[in-house]
Image (cartoon, rainbow, N blue to C red):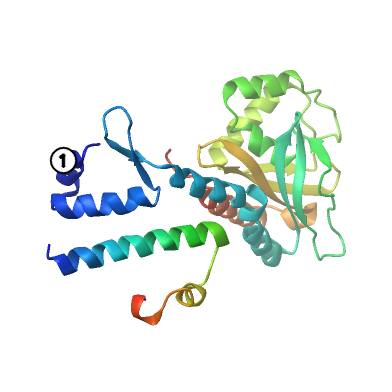
Amino acid sequence: MSLIELTERLNQPKSSTYRILLTLENRGFIARSDEDGKYCLGYKQLMLTRKLLERNNLRAAAWQEMKRLSELFGDTVNLGVLAEGSVLYVEIIESNHALRMTDTVGSKAPVHATAIGKAIAAHLPQGELDALLDGCEYEALTERTIRSREPFLDELAKVRKAGYAFDNQEVVEGACCVAAAVFNMFGHVAGAISVSGPVHRYQPDKAPEIAAQVAASAKAVSRKLGFAEGN
Amino acid sequence: MSMDASRYTIQAVDKALDLMELLADEGSMSLIELWSCWPMKDR
């Protein structure tokens, strides 16, 4: 934009607009185009953005919410991303209950059976989802595991509608998990956060509250990553 | 805008940019930590 355009849009005197622009330009926050001399964002903005992006990674953004869920329910809290067609656990806070679900950071789990896998898959762009499901073997881990594409697509539709995903003893008999997707600043699914534990703690009287809290945490983490709802 | 007001505006812009660069370098800082970076007259 030119100085005149900026002055009009900001509705303030040309002299003070110019002084502010000069200060911003001297500090590298704005620059002038070589072609027409108009003002545009400067390299310093890029440097600040880069530092922000470096720090604002998924694990750092999710940590406080993971701790909150851990303190609230006492069950294992997991953070997972999609990697090479599987769920990769990138952070875990273990349950303090004697009877608990345990996984290790860096371990992988199948997308079609886990709540994290469903939560992520439900929000993938169509092309990525197709590619993911083309490579899915739908291994039957328990009697409840979804074993083919069509029922899995039906399940993903339910996940999108509910805002969270549920694994009802589909990976391990007797174990349940609730997950919700986390989105980045571009609106792409970045991963999912989940709470998992033994089935008796996920009965119909308890599960909705856990699901609501997991969904709230996922939203909070998404906001930290720069996701604005509706974008 | 008077010369004084203009000068203060520029100082404020300068300080705001200092603040952004400081936060970019440090990641996060408390208000007390930020205060300690500025002389009393500029707070």
What's the chain of the residue with tag 1? A
The foreground one among A43 and A168 is A43
> Considering only vertical position in the picture, is A85 above or below A23?
above
The amino acid type found where label 1 is placed reads Ile
At x 72% / y 54%, what residue is drawn? A202
The foreground one among A14 and A148 is A14
Q: Is residue B36 left or right of residue A173?
A: left
Residue that sits furthest to the bottom in the current view: B40
Residue A226 visible in this rendered orientation of the protein: no
The foreground one among A11 and A95 is A11
> Considering only vertical position in the picture, is B38 above or below A149?
below
Where disc 1 sits, the SS reads helix
Q: Is residue A229 left or right of residue A20?
A: right
Give residue A43's quadrant in the image.
top left
Quadrant location, the C terminus of chain A: top left
Residue A109, percent from left and from top: 81, 38
Q: Which residue is mark 1?
A: A4
Residue A195 visible in this rendered orientation of the protein: yes
At x 51% / y 46%, what residue is drawn? A47
At x 13% / y 53%, what residue is drawn? A13
The foreground one among A111 and A159 is A111
> Considering only vertical position in the picture, is A125 above or below A227?
above
Quadrant location, the N terminus of chain A: top left
Residue A108, percent from left and from top: 82, 39
> Considering only vertical position in the picture, is A50 above or below B30?
above
Q: Residues within 10 Å of mark 1 (few under 14, many from 20)?
A: few
Count of labels in the image:
1
Residue A88, percent from left and from top: 77, 40
Residue A128, percent from left and from top: 63, 23
